[in-house]
Image (spheres, grey):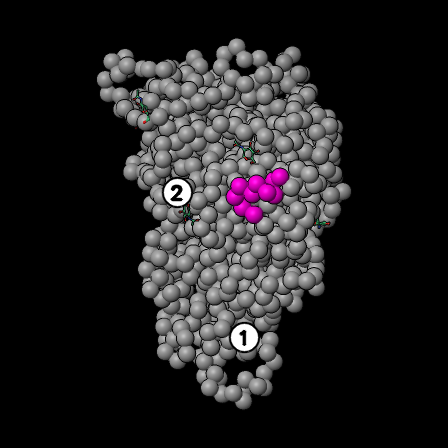
Amino acid sequence: MNEKDGLPRPVPVAGPPGPHWRRQTRRRARTFRLLALGCLCFIAFAQWKQLTQPATPESPPTSGLTAHGLSLTRLEANLATCAQLRKKPQDPIGFGRERNARYIDGHAPTLIRNASVWVGEPAAGTSPDAARKGHGYSWITADIYLEHGLIKRVAASIPLSSVAADALVYDAAGRPLTAGIIDMHSHAGVGALPGLDGSEDTNEMASDITPYVRSIDGLHPADPQIQVIKSGGVTTSLILPGSANNMGGEAYVIKHAVGKADGRNETSAADMLADPERNWRFMKMACGENPKNVYGRPGRGGPTSRLGESWEFRHAFEQAAKMVQAQDDWCDAAALGVQGLKEYLPRELRWESLGALLRDQVRLNTHCYTVPDLEAFVDHTNEFKFKVRAFHHAHQTYLVPEILKRAYGGVPPASALFPDTMWYKVEANTASEYAGKLLYDAGLTTVYVSDNPVLNAQHVVFEAAKGYKYGLPYHAALAAVTTAPAELLGFGNRLGKIKPGFDADIVVWDSDPLSVGASPVQAWIDGTAQFEKPFLLKKPAPEPIVPDESLGKIPEGPFPLDDVIFTGVSKVLLNGDFSNLSSNSTVVISHGKLACIGACEAELLAAATSNTRIIPLKKGYLTESFTAFGSKVGLNAIDAESDTDNGPTGTAFTRGADGLALDTIKTNYSYAYGVTKAISAPKLKHLDTHHGTSVAFLTGAQTAAEQGAILLADTAVHYTLDPSVKTAGEHTSISAAVASLRRKLFHAAASLSNPKQEADTDPTSEESFLRRVANGSLPLAVTVHSADVIASLLSLKSDLDVSLPTPLRLIILGGAESHLLARELAAANVSVVLSPAFSYGVSWDQRRALTGAPLTDGTGVDKLLREGVVVGLGIGEDWMVVEMGLMAGVVWRNSGGRVGEREALGLVGGNIWKMLGVREKGGHFVVWEGSPLEVGGRVRGVGGGRGWVDVWV
Ligand SMILES: *[C@@H]1O[C@H](CO)[C@@H](O)[C@H](O)[C@H]1NC(C)=O
Ligand SMILES: *[C@@H]1O[C@H](CO)[C@@H](O)[C@H](O)[C@H]1NC(C)=O
Ligand SMILES: *[C@@H]1O[C@H](CO)[C@@H](O)[C@H](O)[C@H]1NC(C)=O
Ligand SMILES: *[C@@H]1O[C@H](CO)[C@@H](O)[C@H](O)[C@H]1NC(C)=O
Ligand SMILES: *[C@@H]1O[C@H](CO)[C@@H](O)[C@H](O)[C@H]1NC(C)=O
């Protein structure tokens, strides 16, 4: 299972045998009988054939039998297998190859000129200690020559005259160039997108222990997401089975080049294998919540607890260890002569792969979040003597470096993390965005991964960028998606670096890869360019990031202060004109309010003699605070835990204000990341659905009763028209749900002229709220992604507007496909809150989302803004609340200059209030060190409308 909702996809449980169920069973029984009959026929045929055929080598003549009646030929073959079984894989070589085994004849060599190259290792002569600190790493200007799928030369200047006459020449124009990005945790291909039952093969859930299944057997090369991922510069991925099972199965490292269009000979999973020689094997295991939640249900056979999980692990390892021991005994005996052996080499397919793990031929990656899971698993490694290369998800590894160091094999496992994806289940509730840095400080290795489709692996390099934002040094953050996974996968000589002998997997970027919105301009896999006509975003000449070591200091706070002074503020992006300020302004806060912005000499002078704290900033920013619209912040604490959630509403129309629950990790993080206001509605079914009225509130408030905590009790009226509506309430079809909404709205419109009816109704009933929608005093927000359903809504609105006093105020929430109707939405004055801000076609109704350069000319937001639609950015999942500034930053950076900083910030603030038709409550502000739109920006002060300012230092 992936981690999208913390819970497995619903497993069909046979219901009471109704007619439909019986029909199915009958059909199945018939198919089975036919199949069985077919098999029987075949066996009869085969036996007859054997009787009438001369003996083959598989059934040797009696003369080849030992005294115990065993076939000598087979025993000799078994003995040869012993060598195979005991093979010790080595990391395959890089340098020293003439050609890459994946190279396809006929592909021309390529000379890449004038690139700014990140080699992936420090300059020669840098000591290991200095290198660990990042010394010796830099961007160097170089030319690179690719031939036979390998990097052949890297030099300051490679003259054209020195390369093959047919070489293609690519001018990188000084742009940054890195090795292809490696994602060490992906389900691309096995959980093909858009997610549909028919192509979902991530987990084999027949049993909790399935080390014997293989992800390659379900890998769909035609999964469009494989191409989308590559468009983010990801050239290599580890395709893992899901984490429903304690032992999930074998995994495979693939490159994202598929079929002829991408320069491959054929379209097959085998053709995607990064190491066609298959030196190492890979495996996935998982501990904790998932297996016990999947198998702990009635009829599933357990385990029901972590205790049971440990037993499942140990029991399976015991079987495999027994088999390995029996094989070794046999092989030792056979080495002395096979004649006296009483049996053939013992083998059992079920335990074969696990045996290979015990023989150190398999690189194991284990999904484990919490301290007990990590500790138990490390115990298993020592009990059964096998290595685990990385713990995945691993949110609590930063708390227990000593446990990791106890793992079998002497090398502590790495942590494959998300920097800030959290709160979606209990295991993810104690995450720290600083984990990467803390692990680094403890001498351990951090890797950032996507868990695609949980995160869109296209942006896995952005996870590394956030790792850097949260204190992991720049070089280690880049290593976390290049050299570190390469080494952990056994490809340390081939992938992750720009050096002669390495595979020619290369990305040229339009900006520093760890900057917001960084997009590839071109990518090569095994020396073949992957994008025929890449869209190129208009950006200023790229400047490499100068690593900011001050990011390594974890901010402390919040310290609530009445008065504080910030100096060194270079930009003020509050509403109003502050264009006259110097680039070194002072911001004075007195009694929690902005009291002076500018030189503020008098205040600075007075502060010298008072206790007022002065905080100097480097490149400070002062902005409005952000608003999260349509999340579950304030209505849910831990996504997957129903006790912490307001719950689904089904057919009931309710008010968010009635379910508000504050003082959670989510509300605290929101506030600390500058999101002082949230507007949340009850969910219809899933967390990203809505039904009822949304409440606007202060994220900093401890309870709803606190003075001013509720900004607006009923902000918008919400309905959901995504596929979940078919299973959530009274409707079983989209058409029925649209019809029902139309009926309700027309009824409300009609009742406007019937004052009696109005007087009769509860002011918080659905009817009353809909009358307020009809009379123009409340907006209608509909959660919908599909362009087709949005088209239905536009038609509904145009029919309805005729009978309304003012046109319906409609907001589309979600809107993955809204860009297809950008012009129509603008014409109808309909606004859109994109949620998530950058959709990637996870589901059928989002499949036409635009994923951006180099595949598409911008994303949905660009198209909507170009047509003049009022747009806001929502958060598809609540953890994204910590990166609303960065979301706006991506739009700003990738807009080709059309969206200024202020407009970008409006996407996560002012625009939301504009489309709601409500005057935004003033007096909230955020003080940043660095730009909120860029990776290095950090919150230093928040004025959240509560009479003081909270400060982080
Ligand atoms: C690709 O196909 C060509 C022509 O069929 C063949 O000669 C070549 O060996 C193939 N290369 C690989 C790497 O499969
Ligand atoms: C490399 O690219 C930069 C940026 O476009 C340019 O200024 C410089 O002249 C180029 N150098 C060469 C040798 O082409
Ligand atoms: C900006 O400064 C100039 C020159 O001091 C002044 O004339 C102008 O009115 C100022 N504009 C604003 C908006 O304060
Ligand atoms: C910015 O202004 C503050 C307060 O006036 C002053 O202390 C500081 O030296 C100035 N910094 C620069 C770089 O001018
Ligand atoms: C939220 O933050 C406040 C203020 O720092 C703190 O008192 C409270 O314990 C925090 N609540 C949670 C759930 O973290």
Three-letter amino acid code of the residue under disc 1: Phe
The residue lying toward the viewer, choosing from 366 and 423, is: 423
Residue 325 in the image: state x and y as whole percent: 69, 24
Residue 280 in the image: state x and y as whole percent: 54, 25
Q: Residue at x 33, y 39 (%)?
A: 538
- Quarter-wise, where is residue 557 in the image? top right
Disc marking residue 172: none
Dot placed on the residue nearer the N-terminal end, 2 or 1: 1
Residue 914 visible, this angle = yes
Disc marking residue 769: 1
Q: Residues within 10 Å of mark 2 (few under 14, many from 20)?
A: many
Q: Residue at x 70, y 29 (%)?
A: 401
Q: Which residues are magenta?
A: 596-605
Residue 733 in the image: state x and y as whole percent: 47, 68
Q: Residue at x 54, y 37 (%)?
A: 568
Three-letter amino acid code of the residue under disc 2: Asn
Magenta highlight on residue 602: yes
Residue for badge 2: 894
Residue 260 in the image: state x and y as whole percent: 32, 35
Q: Residues within 10 Å of mark 1 (few under 14, many from 20)?
A: many
Number of on-image labels: 2
Task: Report helix, strand or loop for mark 2.
Answer: loop
Q: Relative to 720, say whether 396 is above or below.
A: above
